[in-house]
Every structure is written in structure tokens, then in C-alpha cells.
Image (cartoon, rainbow, N blue to C red):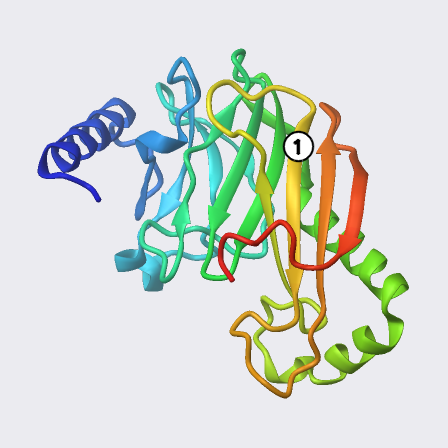
Amino acid sequence: MVTGRCRIVVVIALAWVNSALGQTVPAGYTVPPITLSPDGRYGVTVPSVDDEDSIKDPQNQIIEVKTGQLGGAIQTEYVAFDHINNGEIDPAEWTADDSMLLWQVDGKWGFSTEVLVKLAEGKIEWQVDLLKGFEQEMLKRTRQAVPDKYAAVKATSSQYGSWYKDGFAIDCVQDGPGGPLKFPLVYHCFLTSNTKGLEGMTNVDARMTAQVSQDGKIKVTEFHLGTDPPAREW
């Protein structure tokens, strides 16, 4: 629960950031305090839903707070706005030297965005869509383990939204987030074909653990079918 005092702190912090940016932040955008790097030099632009109709090609971009210089767009399937239905922007995780950023946006059934970004002189040098990589690894192993059930789920996947991959919900959660970003990152991934536990559906559940190195490479360290450990959202 957010208390009245916390709301005041958030409002003051946001006002400070936007004051520091002056007129350099793109129109229709803010730079939330939770996106700032450890020394406050960099942040991430977030478009406002109130200005959605007037913003052409909305993006989440790296921005240098003092100068307003943009360092490139974070390439994601879902652009994070300041208000998200059934979701929220997680506090950005940066390395202590501001050179790397982990950008994560949570959703209803799991994370919708997990991108690792490498900066060089304030510009994006490279970025890796970690969530997409985790999903591909999880789906490949599940398909190999239960090919018939996988095919049955995929055959009915058109009735679900685009967030589901081949009819499966996948949530990948970082182990022990918080503080300066340190490698390797450890993620626990959860897969299910039946988020609501409905009868008459083909049930497939799987679990996976993976590590991410400082160069953005994903290494799967464990995979098994089943519901142990339990997922946070289902």
C-alpha cells in the first residue's frame, strides 16, 4: 500500500527530475525517478497515456538527465506508458558505473518486458531481449518433453491474446533483484497452459532456471516439467 507520505515523496522526486530536465524532455514524456541510474545521470523516458494520441511512435528511450540528450530506444514489444492496465514499471536496475541497465515491465500474468541494455558514452551500444530468449528456451524444451500435448495447446492458441506464446503463459522472475546490477543474473521461469485452472484444457506446466552473463548470453542450468516451485501469478 502506498501511504500519503510516500505519494508526496514520489511527487516531489518526479517534480525534481522534470525540473532538472527543463524543456529538454520530449513533449508528452516524463522520466520517473524509478528509472534513474545510481548517480542520477541517466533515466528512461516514459510516454503519458494522456498524450498517447499526439505522440508519434511512442518509445522508452535512454536520456541524460542534465542535457536531455537521448541515447536510443529500448527495443520492446510493449512500450511502457506512465499508467499500465494490470501492470507496472519495475524500478530500473543499473550497474554501479551506469554502463548497463536492466529494464523490466510487469504484467497481469507475468513480465511483458525484460531487456538488458549496454551503454557507451550515453548511447545504447547493444541490447538483448532477455524475455524473448527465455521464452524460446522454455518453449523448445517443453516441446521436446511433451510434443503431443504441446501441439494440442498450440492448436488452440489462436483464442488467446498475443501475449501468450503458442498458447502458453510464461513468467520469468529475477532471483534477488535490487541494488547495483551484478552478474551473472539468475532467473527462474514458469510456464503453464492453464493460468486459471479451468477444466477440460490440456495441462502443461514446466519450470526452468537460467543465468545471464555480462555480455547478455543466456545459459539454461535446469529444466523440468511440473508446478514446483509454484508461480507467483497463477
Residue at 61% across, 31% down: 117
Can you say which quadrant of the picture contains the N terminus?
top left
Q: Is residue 67 above or below residue 61?
A: above
- Residue 123: horizontal and vertical position, in percent? 58, 26
Direction from residue 165 to residue 232 in the image, left or right: left
Q: Is residue 121 above or below residue 47?
A: above
Quarter of the figure with residue 100: top right
Q: Is residue 201 above or below residue 79?
A: below
- Residue 177: horizontal and vertical position, in percent? 51, 30
- What amino acid does circle 1 point to? Val
Along the viewing direction, whichever of 80 and 157 lies nearer the viewer: 157
Residue at 31% across, 58% down: 49
- Residue 183: horizontal and vertical position, in percent? 67, 21
At mark 1, the secondary structure is strand
Residue at 66% across, 48% down: 189
- Residue 88: horizontal and vertical position, in percent? 39, 49
Direction from residue 217 to residue 18 in the image, left or right: left
Disc 1 crowd rating (10 Å Cα; few below 14, some 14-19, many 20+) is many
Q: Is residue 58 above or below residue 67?
A: below
Q: Which residue is mark 1?
A: 186
Residue at 47% across, 26% down: 178
